[in-house]
Amino acid sequence: MNEQNVFTLINQQDGNLAFKMFAFNDNSYFDYLQRNNFYSIIWINKGSGLLKVDFSEYLFEENTMFTFAPYQPFMVSTDKKISGIAIQFHSDFYCIHRNPKETNCDTVLFNNIYQPPFITIDKEAGETFTLVLEKLKSEFQNITENDYELLVPYLKIFLVTASRIKSQSRIDEPKITDTKTPYILRNLKSVIEDNFKEKHSASEYATLLNISPNALAKIVKTHFNKTLTDLITERIIVEAKRELYMTSKPIKEIAFTLGYSDEFYFSRVFKTNTDISPQIYRETVGFGKAELN
């Protein structure tokens, strides 16, 4: 796939991007902070650099695949030549929430606050992805207007393959020993999942885990490369996005469900982390999808 091979589908109803696949040979596409209203998959074939995403920074090497959810802020910094392939798709083209077990990518590739948003691609996986990309390319060359049904199955194969690789890597699981730190890490996720709608402060989680706030902060920063407050906030935003996309609930109701009695304060928190308001997110990413089925 070379520079001439840029394949794009536009949603005829609103004129927005539905699906796009393109090759890149430099960093000009990703050298600025992005908050897109679609999902992004970026496969770096050659080159290395620094990924800045959400509250964290990660060094990366070649054969790394990034995965970003809508309005997740990211940019790639490098002084070296990078090349690879990118896939972008909107929720209206393929909804990862409608049948979550279909690809298993909702909480593995995307919206996964406990793992870095990338995977390492070995030779075997690379060959599989290349084959699927060629199928997508071939299908693009054969489609006519509104006749792109085979693109979605090939995209699903791509997502399933990436999800399996990330699931099998298990890089988020600490090695369990008899020390206190792995015990804390092992229980932190379940404590956050059980309480993020009611408890928003780091100190509350330290109390639940029976550890001092400073000690917990150090453990979280070391293991997740972000603060505990960042982790809690990210989890709240992920849930807010799902509610905005999957339901037609009023924003005030969503805010209350997530522990915010003040709708406007919730909206400020959401905008601080996504750069847009909850209403704009709903209008540009989706609205009441689950209720349409």
Image (cartoon, rainbow, N blue to C red):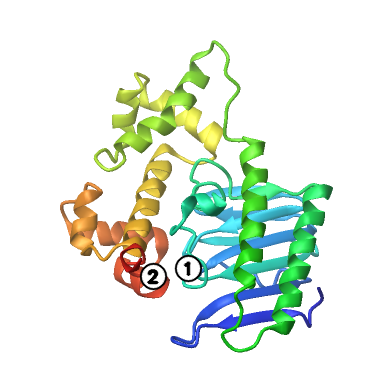
In this rendered view, identify the residue nearer to me: 225 or 192. 192
Q: In this view of the protein, which residue sits in the foreground, 132 or 77?
A: 132
Viewer-side residue, 267 vs 32: 267
Helix, strand or loop at disc 1? loop
Q: Position of residue 249 (x, y in %)?
A: 23, 62
Q: Is residue 30 visible?
A: no
Q: From the viewer's perspective, is residue 57 above or below residue 191?
A: below
Residues at marks 2 and 1 touching, judged by CB atoms closer than 8 Å:
yes
Cα gap from disc 2 to disc 1, whole angstroms:
7 Å
Looking at the rendering, in which quadrant would you find the N terminus? bottom right
Q: Position of residue 161 (x, y in %)?
A: 67, 51
Q: Is residue 160 left or right of residue 141?
A: left
Q: Amino acid at mark 2?
A: Gly
Q: For the residue labelled by badge 2, is the local secondary structure a helix, a strand or a loop? A: loop
Residue extending farthest to the top is 178
* Residue 171 location (% of width, % of height): 62, 35
Position above or below: 225 against 275: above
Q: Image point 58% across, 26% down: which residue?
A: 174
The numbered mark at residue 286 is 2
Seen at 54% across and 40% down, the residue is 225
- Label 1: few (<14), some (14–19) or many (≥20) C-alpha neighbours in 10 Å: many
Q: Determine the residue positioned at 40% across, 52% down.
A: 238
* Farthest left residue in view: 261
Task: Tell me which label, 2 or 1, sits earlier in the chain.
Answer: 1
Residue sitting at 31 percent across and 56 percent down? 269
- Looking at the rendered image, the quarter that the C terminus falls into is bottom left
**Front position in the image: 85 or 201:** 85
Residue receiving disc 1: 91
